[in-house]
Image: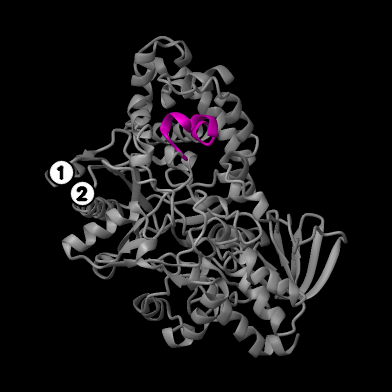
Amino acid sequence: MKEILQSIADRIISADDRGVTPRDLNVADGILSYMHLMPAHTRRAVTQLIWLFEYLPPVIILKPRRFSRLGPRDQDRYIEAWGTSRLGLLRTGFRVLKTLALSTYYQNSASWKAIGHMEE
Amino acid sequence: MISTLPTASEERAQVCIVGSGAAGSVLAYELADAGLDVILLEEGEELGKADFTQREGELIPRIYADAGSRATHDAAIPILQGKCLGGTTVINHGICFRTPERILDEWRREFGVSGLSLDTLQPHFERAEKMIGARRLGPAEINPNNQVLKRGCERLGMSGDVMTLNMQPCGSCGPCNLGCPEDKKGSTLVNYLPAAAKRGARIFRNCRVQSVQVENGRAAGVTAGSFRVRAGVVIIAAGAVNSPAILLRTGLGNAIPAIGSGVSLHPLFPLLVFSDTPLHSMKGLPHSYYCDEFFSADDFLFEGLFVSPGVFASGMGGFGRQHREFMKQLPRLGLTYVQLRDRTRGQVRLAGGEPVVRYTMNQEDRERARKALKLLAAICLEGGAAKVATTHVKPVVMRDKSEIAQIDQAMFRPNDLTVFSAHPQGGCPMGANPRRSVVDSQCAVHGVAGLYVCDASVFPSPVGINPMISIMALASLTAERIIGSSVGAGL
């Protein structure tokens, strides 16, 4: 699960410029810790979503690989396919994963220097 | 600390109040001030200003409902509600609007609500505003982000004004949505609740109420895990999600079929503002100007805002490289939003004993949101924004008014763009018809003597404006009515 979340965070956050990366900030661990604070029914649904996201590339973008094994370009195409899908369930999945990744990364003050936050 | 953890398995009081937010804290103060023996129960913990460290990762799980993960059934609309002593008044931006007269008229006309007029509420508005330190901001307090909205309104001849907030000038330390480390925000944590405790109200924290005890058709107390409170009057003030959930867990759903119905969310549609010059949108009071040009005819408001980085980043449009490029411009980013008085109605239901908010925005509201975002884009561009962007997965970026029509091509289905709710209302609607409402015009639950619901859940239709003062005034009036009623006399 951690490996999947790391791959998702890498592509959604895309901080491979001069900023610290999601791996530097242990975003995947942060998401897993946060999930333990969620109500049980929400946590179960998010867990199922993460596994579903990992294994649906063959169906969604016709690539016979798990998400975490795709190349960056296909990963981005796959994420966008979820976010813009005609299926509400996939758009929900995109929203949840995006929120988890971005909020976990940007609430860490170590990410702020690269975006100029709290600088005069 | 003004609260304690329960030590006995059972306590007794004349009045038991569930929830310590805008309604519960006012009720506790007013009833204790009248000499009644009051117990107030809060699900969350008590924090003081030293605890409000501005660290999102630490605070959001502590002070937001469901650790910040509360949302509609399809995750399309996060629902931001406080879960700590002081409730949502701790995490909101302190906006003080009085209930518009036309909304009160609508409640009377369409739902049979009686005794709720501007005249009736006037002294209660004044009382609440004084208690929480509401003040109209000065023009110099409009921060650069909100200035974009103001300039745009002025240049286009549209109606707008500075906010009235319960916030005093502060050190501009950061986002107000994480609680105030300077006690400059007049949340009920720093006024009503200490005053209630001083008047003898007993406040218990970390008490999650499962249900109301109903005996022989009247309220007899509440159960919170192994802790029970016995009281002849029970007032549920747990908010628009938890109040109906408590009534449903009590087993009143069959007798009162309207429980959980009529939920509105006041959906907020953000619009990102890019400036050529630094805005530092978190400096100053982040919520300092609004535009009400379209409120009467179209039922939406425009407001300026900024929030903490994690919430901001997750709400911004796009993902990956484009999102990162947006974030790297943070000092020059601003945020405005549409606040829609929605026509959609959802429901609160239970799943495994927990509340689920079922709400799917109807087509009419989606088109109203589209219209409103186009108008807001025009205002912000006129106000000096270099460009503006929607929060879609593929954001609509507009540099010129001629590009605003691109919004017509964008999708507005659930989760196509970011929508927040900070003002859930309904779920225990007020009205004269017991088949279509949960409480009467006195906030008394139909058919259960001594049981009241008093918070935003009783609003039969959304108030349209930020609801804190409406909730507080209703609570103040309800307390007055309980004190003056036979129920109050019998206590």
B428 or B374: nearer the viewer = B374
Q: Which mark is residue B381?
A: 2
Residue depicted at 51% across the width and 29% down the height: A49
- Magenta segment: does it hold A109? yes
Q: Is residue B448 visible?
A: no
Could you tell me residue A45's position as x and y percent?
55, 34
For mark 1, name the chain: B
* Residue B191 picture quarter: bottom right
Tags 2 and 1 touching, CB below 8 Å: yes
User: What segment carries the magenta color?
Assistant: A105-118
Binning the other alpha carbons within 10 Å of mark 2 as few (below 14), some (14 to 19) or many (20 upward) gives: many
Q: Could you tell me the amino acid type at mark 2? A: Leu
The residue tagged 1 is B400
- In the image, taking residue B344 as reference, residue B38 lies left or right, namely right
Residue depicted at 52% across the width and 26% down the height: A50
Report the number of numbered marks: 2
Q: Could you tell me the amino acid type at mark 1? A: Asp
Could you tell me residue A19's position as x and y percent?
45, 23
